[in-house]
Image (cartoon, helix red, strand yellow):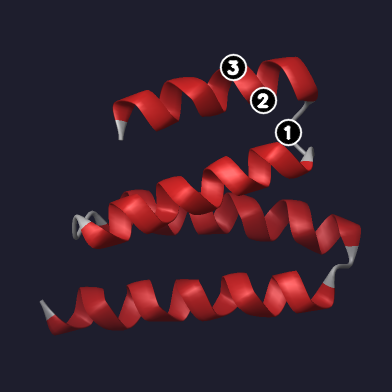
Amino acid sequence: GHLYRSVLQAVEKTLGPTHRDVLVYLERLGELYTAQDRWDEAEGCYQQMLKTLQRSGNQSAITSVMGKLGLVQRRRQQR
């Protein structure tokens, strides 16, 4: 997770927080955190993605991220 977070920060700084590559790294980091049962970190990644996507109006991507958020929230409740 630490390596992805470092790369994400570098990509954000270089390309800007709304660049597609930033969203890709956020998604991968969120998936990694989900697999590790690190719910708060996963939710933070997906929330950040959602904020960016809502500005762009990409409804299909927003729906996908909302599904991932729902999964994280359900898994957190099951633990």
Real-space CA distance between mark 2 and mark 3, rounded to the nearest whole angstrom: 5 Å
- Disc 2 + disc 3, Cβ < 8 Å: yes
Query: Which residue was labeled with disc 1?
Result: 17
Disc number for residue 70? none
> Where is residue 63 shown, x and y percent of the image?
68, 80
* Residue visible at 89% across and 58% down in the picture: 56
Vertically, is 63 above or below 20?
below
Q: Say which quarter of the image contains residue 12.
A: top right
> Which quadrant of the rendered structure holds the N terminus?
top left
Which quadrant of the structure image shows residue 77?
A: bottom left
The type of residue carrying mark 3 is Ala
Q: Are marks 1 and 2 in contact (CB under 8 Å)?
A: yes
Q: Which residue is mark 2?
A: 12
Instruction: Mark 1: give few (<14), some (14-19) or many (20+) Cα within 10 Å.
Output: some
User: Residue at left 47%, top 72%?
Assistant: 69
Earlier in the chain: of badge 3 and badge 1, it is 3
For residue 10, the mark is 3
Which residue is depicted at the point 73% across and 15% down?
14
Q: What is the distance, in whole Å, between disc 3 and disc 1 at their CAs?
A: 10 Å
Under circle 1, the secondary element is loop
